Amino acid sequence: MREITASGQTLEEAVQSALEQLNTTRDQVEIEVIDEGKKGFLGLFGSRAVVKVKLAKNNIAETEAFIANVTNNMGAKVEIKTTVANTHVTFELSGEKIALLIGKRGQTLNALQYLVHLVLNKNTKQFYTVTLDAEGYRQRRKETLETLALKMADKAARLNKKVALEPMPAFERKIIHNALQGNATVSTYSDGREPHRHIVIKPS
């Protein structure tokens, strides 16, 4: 991790000097003020501002390396495409043995996503949410869940009884809730404890 000490007539000048030397931007560094600097008589001969600036830990790059290492150990070498939108990071995986990383109903991919989330947010001030995808699996799974939601809602309304779905992670349960939000014939709620928390569809 590179770190330098820089000075200037003002704090801003000192920071800018450091950024130029590190060839980076303010959002990529951590700044420690050593001396704010003081102006002397008529603004002359005052003490200069001094700052210590170091490149912040690049958790996204480290997380990419973690993904590459884990998937390689699983026997599935992948290419990783990373997209950052504000505080949400999407890692899109592609490769020959991608099915190995998805697992039954996405269980392996969900477990990997949980680990990736922990690694990305380790020892950092910035909190990120994460999506780990594999050749468009998340969109296909979303469409499958939406179809399932409509089918089970119809069943609940037709039989006039509650229908419990299989346990799902929170982000998949949200897809079910959203799919049936405007359905006047049923309502939904989550029941049970993790990792067995599931959605119940109830006739209105």
Image (tube, grey):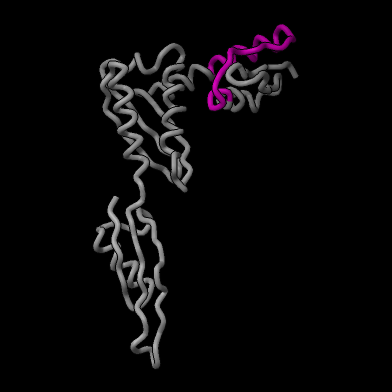
Q: Image quadrant for the C terminus?
A: top right
In the rendered view, tell whether residue 52 sits above or below residue 39: above
Q: What range of the chain is rendered magenta?
A: 146-173
Q: Nearer the viewer, residue 108 or 143?
A: 108
Residue 125 in the image: state x and y as whole percent: 47, 48
Residue 88 located left or right of residue 176: left
Looking at the image, the residue that sits furthest to the bottom is: 42
Residue at horizontal 45%, vertical 33%? 117
Give the left or right position of residue 110, taking residue 2 as reference.
right
**Looking at the image, which residue is at 70% across and 19% down?**
186
At x 53%, y 16%, the residue is 147
Residue 193 as seen in the image, left or right of residue 111: right
Q: Is residue 1 above or below residue 19?
A: above
Magenta span: helix, strand or loop, mainly?
Answer: helix
In this view, 112 is above or below 18 = above
The answer to which image quadrant residue 150 occupies is top right
Q: Position of residue 63 (x, y in %)?
A: 35, 35
